[in-house]
Amino acid sequence: MSQLSFPLLLVNFKAYREALGKSALKLASMAEKASRETGVCIAVAPQIVDLRLLAGEVDIPIFAQHIDPVGYGRYTGHISPEAVLDAGCVGALISHSEHRLSLNVIEETVRRASEVGLITVVCADTVERCRAVAAYRPTAIAIEPPELIGTGIPVSKARPEVVSGAVEAVRGVNPSVRVLCGAGITQGVDVEAALRLGAEGVLVASGVVKSPDPYRVMLELASAMKP
Ligand code: G3P
């Protein structure tokens, strides 16, 4: 299932030691297994250096954690949408809270990614920013209050109004833009709460990557999305 569908469980590997190289491959294989088991789309966003490895080995959608609004040419050290596509990715996170970009750069990056056919998931920290970003027509916007990231305190329970507010704001600008939420999500009940608030999936990291049993957690989170 390398095609993306919603509801979506998107697992960000960040720069965690537990999710690098061979370990990244192991985690991605677990994601593939959990996805097959549940019928729910599970995508992963490994570190840039692992993109081609994972895309060649597993049949799930692979995302880059970041791209730059550049093309071919003199862009040393930048990550072009073309390179990410060529590595076998279907999409990219843009402006994650740990790699925040200005609105102008987000707009340009979404435009460049769309030109090459990449799916775009833009992260935003507030309802207002979600509203602003929706105008750029990304595939999805992930609302993530930074203060909850990595805490295990789920956004869908601690800040439900932010999730429903983001859903409403994005719908008001462009109803075709999907809304995900992330930060602190570790359990099936957190996912159920997110979906009840109108989100079409979740963006998770430490709850999966740092777990002693990542497969079990992915299975639980994906199962909570089954109709
Ligand atoms: O990209 C997902 C992320 O920022 C949420 O992190 O560790 O709270 O699931 P975590």
Image (spheres, grey):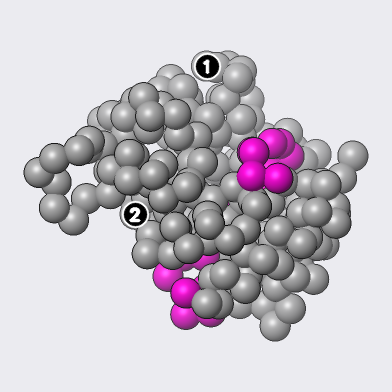
| Residue to which mark 1 is pinned | 173
Q: Classify 3 as above or below 13.
A: above
Residue 120 placed where, x, y %? 47, 36
Q: Which is closer to the viewer, label 1 or label 2?
A: 2
* Residue 170 forms part of the magenta stretch: no
- Which part of the image, by quadrant, shows the N terminus? top right
Depth order, front residue of 134/89: 89
Question: Mark 1 or mark 2, which has the lower sequence index?
Answer: 2
Whether residue 210 sits left or right of residue 102 in the image: it is right
Residue drawn at (57%, 56%), measured in percent from left and top?
Answer: 44
Residue 17 placed where, x, y %? 47, 80
| Residue to which mark 2 is pinned | 99
Residue 96 placed where, x, y %? 42, 50
Rendered image quadrant of residue 175: top right
* Residue 18 forms part of the magenta stretch: yes
- Count neighbours of disc 2 (C-alpha within 10 A) and say few if under 14, some if 14 to 19, many if 20 or more: few
Q: How many marks?
A: 2
